[in-house]
Amino acid sequence: MPIPEKTPVSGGDMKNETTVLRLIYPQWQGGIVDHWMPDLLPEDASKGYFLGAQLLKMLAPESTAMTAEVPVSLDIRDRAVEKGISARRVIMKQTGAALDIVRENAPEKIVTLGGECSVSVVPFTYLVAKYPDDVAIVWLDAHPDVNLPYDEYKGYHAMALTACLGMGDEEIMRMLPGKVAARNALIVGLRSWDTGMRQRQTELGIKGLSPAEVAEDSKAILDWLKTTGVSKVLVHFDLDVLDPAEIIAGVGVEPDGMKIAEAVRVINDIATHYELVGLTVAEFMPRIAIRMKRMLDGLPLLKD
């Protein structure tokens, strides 16, 4: 399926500057995840992030914010590995489409509903460029997402944080508006590393906090934010940071994660003490809805 040339925008007349942009970004190509979900058909699992983004759009509170959706290909054949990145060609095209939307709206703040983790890359690098030297990233995730194209795993979603730091595919990096210093990135809820990623995190100087370190309060996060000297924060909320004993919302099911109430409290505490200019909710993999969709696809009359 080709990517449409136009992007749907709603929320009133187009203005030169939008205070808040709600960006629906159903990119799924950055994940190579079907092998982790054997109960789903491979194509359904791969494109599950697309459905997840549509459900987040439906479930999110109503807002007067301008809303735009990044056009995303649904062609399962667009998965070729090029220069160490799966589906690199289509990801670059969709990155360009997302950049066009953001630049056209020129928002002061962006809420992004994804889609796999790489959906944070465009809005975050845009906001870092808009507020130079005054932004920190708090990355809620069970994993560090500091992979690079030459690593064994070729999914771009595992390269999302390093992309925000200006590290990765040279052509993609040239497209992005800005980058944040590694010292201004914090990973919260971290508890799982691919081979070599713990060492890379250490080498980059990115601090990580386990779920246990933020279970009682947000003091460790707020203390770290004080050291950055910034006034604005970007929060990336990968749903696999949550404890699967309470809810399985993402692909990852690493045990002993954050409780929903803890994650909500952390984000609200950050927003109370700092200006929250970017918030991403990513990696929603609605397993039951995916299976329901497959069931409905098999029923008579529904396609007539």
Image: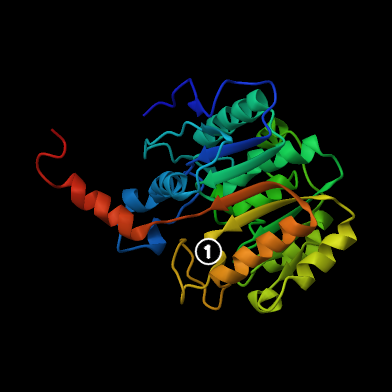
- Residue drawn at x 73%, y 68% is 208
- Residue drawn at x 84%, y 50% is 231
- The residue closer to the viewer here, 58 or 23, is 58
Q: Quadrant of the C terminus?
A: top left
Q: In the picture shown, does residue 251 fall above or below 233? A: below
Where is residue 100? Give x, y as percent.
61, 25
- Residue drawn at x 61%, y 44% is 111
Q: Quadrant of the N terminus?
A: top left
Crowd tier of the residue under label 1, counting other residues whose Cα lies within 10 Å: few below 14, some 14–19, many 20 or above: many
Question: How is the rendered protein coloured?
Answer: rainbow
Where is residue 105? Give x, y as percent.
64, 26
Q: In the picture shown, does residue 14 fall above or below 214? A: above
Where is residue 236? Give x, y as percent.
64, 54
The amino acid type of the residue labelled 1 equals Asp
Where is residue 86? Give x, y as percent.
51, 44
Judged from this view, the residue extending furthest toward the left is: 300
- The residue closer to the viewer here, 46 or 153, is 46
- Mark 1 falls on what kind of element? helix
- Residue drawn at x 80%, y 65% is 222
- Is residue 15 visible from the viewing direction of this image? yes
- The residue closer to the viewer here, 262 or 179, is 262
Q: Quadrant of residue 300?
A: top left
Please indicate whether residue 7 sits to the left or right of residue 110 in the image: left
- The residue closer to the viewer here, 207 or 246, is 246
Please indicate whether residue 120 sits to the left or right of residue 29 in the image: right
Disc tally is 1
Q: In the picture shown, does residue 103 fall above or below 189? A: above
Residue bearing mark 1: 240
- Is residue 196 visible from the viewing direction of this image? no
Please indicate whether residue 278 sits to the left or right of residue 228 in the image: left
